[in-house]
Every structure is written in C-alpha cells, then in structure tokens.
Image: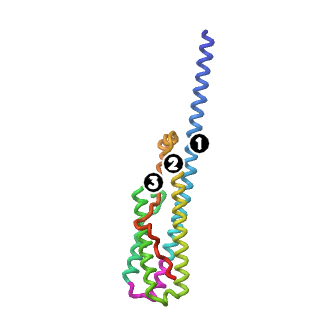
Amino acid sequence: MKKIFAIGCLALVVIGILVAVGVVFWAISLRNNFVTLEEQVNEKWSQVQNQYQRRMDLIPNLVETVKGYAAHENQTFENLAEARARAGSIQVTPEVLNDPQAFSRFQKAQGEISSALSRLLAISENYPDLKANQNFLQLQSQLEGTENRISTERMRFNEAARTFNVAVRRFPDSIVAGYSGFKTKTYFEAETGADRAPKVSFQ
C-alpha cells in the first residue's frame, strides 16, 4: 500500500513538474510573440515618421517657390513655419506609442502642418504664373505623393497596433502581457473635418 502511495505521489510530482514546465514555456512563447508584434508596431511607426520627415523636408522648398510669386502672403508663410516648428519640437521616441497624450500632441502637430500646407497651396489659385511654374508643380506632386504615403503608413501602423492590442488584451495572454509590461498602443485617429478631402491639387 505504501509503495502504491509513493508511486502515486511520484506520478503527481512528475505531472506537476511537467505542467509547470509547460506553463513556463507557454509564457515564454507568449512573451516572445508580444516582442515580435511590438517590433512590427515600432517598424510601422518608423515608416510613419519617415514620411512625416519627408514632408517636413519638402516644406522649405515649397515655401521659397511660392514666396517668389506671392511674397506678400506673409501670414500664410508664418503660420506654416510656426506649425512646422511646433511639430519639430516634439520629441518623437518609442515611448510616444505608450503615452496616449504624447501621441495625441504629435498627431495634432502634424494636423496643423497639413492645415497650413493646404492654405499655402490654396493661394496658388490667385497666381496663374505660380501654378504654371515647373518647380512648384514638381514640389506639389511630391507633396501629394508624400501625403498619400503618410495615409498608407498610418493605416499600416493602425493594423499592426490592432494586432498587437488584441494579443495584449486577449485572456489568458493578457496575464503574461501585464506581467511583462506590455501595454496597448494608441491608434491614429481621423482629424476633425477628415470627412472632407483636403484640396491639394489645383490643376
């Protein structure tokens, strides 16, 4: 009887060890999956930043070209310069993705640039020579392409963030995520008035 009891206890210990090892490997596998998904989010975020930087780099050339034809539109130039300065002053680090308020400030600053650029491009309607300028047309085309890329990269970022957020929030995975410090990511949201397409092309 004692022998059977000892064998039963040994079997329970072995089963307990196997279950514990299984749980550890499950948790490690989940954590590694979270790391992979978070890196995908970070990669998509860097692509968003690249496109915003491309737009920031186009602005000075566009402003200089427009100034050549519309030098007295100072308020428009100043508004764009201020919006660009505000956006450039925001420290964009990976931590922005974990701070909804910082993310919102970043998105708002980029929205202000979009609005200021729209106003800058709108004044070209008053200057037929500017609308015919090859440099302006080329810059306008590059800006349109960049805006399209920004939209695409923001969509890809949101898709990666959604996949990550679902993994982090799904039970029982959420236990491992919480213990490992993984938090949901903030999505890009449509800006106020986004239901109306911005007028960028004036041809």
Q: Amino acid at mark 2?
A: Val
Residue 166: assigned label: 2
Residue 98: assigned label: 3
Q: Residue furthest top?
A: 1
Q: Amino acid at mark 1?
A: Ser
Above-or-below relation of 111 to 200: above
Secondary element at image label 2: helix
Above-or-below relation of 87 to 167: below
Q: Neighbour class for label 2 at 10 Å: few (<14), some, many (≥20)?
A: few
**SS assignment for the magenta stretch, majority:** helix
Residue 87, position as x, y percentages in the image: 43, 69
Whether residue 50 can be seen here: yes
| Residue receiving disc 1 | 29
Q: In the image shown, does 166 or 37 lie closer to the viewer?
A: 166
Q: Residue furthest bottom?
A: 129
Q: Which residues are magenta?
A: 59-73
**Magenta segment includes 71:** yes
Residue drawn at point x = 61 percent, y = 21 percent: 11
Secondary element at image label 1: helix
Left or right, 22 with reference to 96: right
Snapshot quadrant of residue 39:
bottom right
Q: Amino acid at mark 3?
A: Asn
